[in-house]
Image (tube, rainbow, N blue to C red):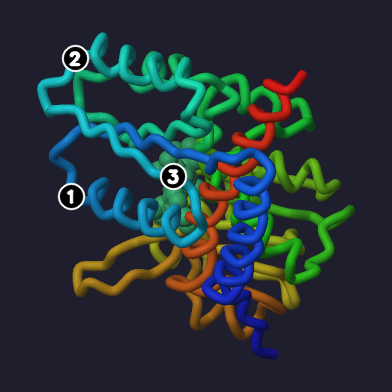
């Protein structure tokens, strides 16, 4: 058997088209565009690249994009003031704080200044709490994209056993909670898990979010399982690979997200969708 490829680029294109239509409708109804403010500290080329990608995505869809790049010598107080001002600014619907922050800046205290209704990265404890309670508000983009890949490809989740390998706050843990909300039976594995192979082998759906290239191999996969790979690992030779050993797993699984071209492309669209959702909710609230 060779697994079906869950094509993230194709899905991202479809989602962008839907989102552009929904954004144009929002603009028609409200007379303003949804708006995103990105806050970052200058001096990180990776963060500059990410910002350009987000700006381009916003422009394509019709979201207003503003960038607040603070100097490298920014203090905690200056950072918090910037975020707090954006939280109070009614013309801004979404706030994205680039993480990780440089050493010396406290991300938890900075995140606490984000108005939870503008938290388009889903990193505020309020939104994490809502997700844990089973009534998600704004959810983190990476796991949101993974769920979109599963749901839009009609992968059955209810009653299925899902094993999520990785328990980070931005990927593994929210993915496990989203699967639980869809009535999967969820196991969370991590670096202290005894016999990872056995835990993965029991799963109908395997999710990898570890940052360890090739950790999940074909011999660990139950025949016919569905595999979602969040890993983005750049090897010494420049190749980008996932946490899943694609060549061995593709022969055992029934469906698999490739790297690149799987979960990655969908993630950025989920951010833009969160901006539109945040704007819709804020407009609805202002009208009451
Ligand atoms: P973190 O480093 O924050 O978390 C990694 C998790 O994997 C931890 O929970 C860790 O366990 C677990 N882990 C590490 N090694 C093993 C192992 N040998 N066996 C089992 N579990 C292990 O990473 P992130 O969650 O931020 O990112 C995970 C991956 O996803 C990375 O490759 C990252 O590049 C990628 N990523 C992809 C995105 C996308 O859009 N597709 C977006 C964001 C990230 P413990 O908690 O015990 O330390």
Residue 116 on image: x %, y %: 57, 22
- Judging by the rendered image, the residue that carries numbered circle 1 is 45
Please give the name of the residue rendered at 50% of the width and 67% of the height, measured from the top-left corner.
244
> Given contact means CB atoms under 8 Å apart, are the residues at marks 2 and 3 in contact?
no
Please give the name of the residue rendered at 59% of the width and 49% of the height, measured from the top-left corner.
273
Q: Which numbered circle lies on residue 279? A: none
Q: CA distance from mark 2 to mark 3?
A: 27 Å
Query: Which mark is nearer the camera, 2 or 3?
Result: 3
Mark before the other along the chain sequence, 3 or 1: 1
Secondary element at image label 2: loop
- Judging by the rendered image, the residue that carries numbered circle 2 is 75
Query: Which mark is nearer the camera, 3 or 1?
Result: 3
- Judging by the rendered image, the residue that carries numbered circle 3 is 64
Residue 42 on image: x %, y %: 16, 36
Q: Quadrant of the C terminus?
A: top right
Q: Is mark 2 within 8 Å of ligand 1?
A: no
Q: Nearer the viewer, residue 108 or 53?
A: 53
Mark before the other along the chain sequence, 1 or 2: 1
Please give the name of the residue rendered at 39% of the width and 63% of the height, measured from the top-left corner.
213
């Amino acid at each position: 058997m060779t697994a079906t490829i869950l094509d993230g680029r194709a899905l991202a294109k479809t989602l962008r088209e839907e989102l552009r239509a929904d954004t144009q409708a929002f603009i028609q109804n409200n007379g303003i565009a949804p708006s995103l403010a990105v806050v970052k500290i200058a001096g990180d080329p990776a963060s500059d690249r990410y910002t350009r990608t987000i700006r381009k995505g916003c422009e394509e869809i019709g979201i207003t994009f503003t960038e607040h790049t603070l100097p490298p010598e920014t203090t905690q107080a200056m950072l918090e003031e910037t975020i707090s001002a954006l939280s109070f600014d009614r013309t801004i619907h979404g706030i994205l704080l680039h993480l990780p922050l440089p050493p010396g800046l406290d991300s938890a205290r900075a995140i606490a200044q984000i108005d939870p209704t503008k938290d388009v990265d889903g990193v505020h404890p309020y939104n994490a709490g809502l997700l844990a309670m089973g009534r998600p508000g704004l959810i983190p983009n990476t796991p949101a994209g993974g769920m979109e890949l599963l749901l839009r490809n009609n992968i059955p989740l209810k009653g299925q056993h899902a094993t999520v390998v990785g328990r980070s706050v931005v990927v593994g843990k929210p993915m496990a909670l989203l699967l639980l909300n869809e009535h999967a039976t969820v196991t969370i594995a991590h670096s202290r898990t005894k016999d990872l192979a056995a835990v993965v082998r029991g799963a109908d759906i395997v999710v990898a979010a570890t940052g360890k290239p090739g950790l999940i191999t074909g011999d660990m996969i139950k025949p016919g399982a569905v595999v979602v790979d969040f890993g983005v690992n750049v090897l010494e030779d420049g190749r980008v690979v996932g946490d899943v050993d694609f060549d061995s797993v593709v022969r055992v699984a029934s469906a698999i997200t490739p790297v690149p071209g799987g979960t990655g492309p969908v993630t950025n669209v989920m951010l833009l969708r969160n901006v539109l959702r945040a704007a819709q909710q804020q407009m609805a609230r202002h009208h009451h």
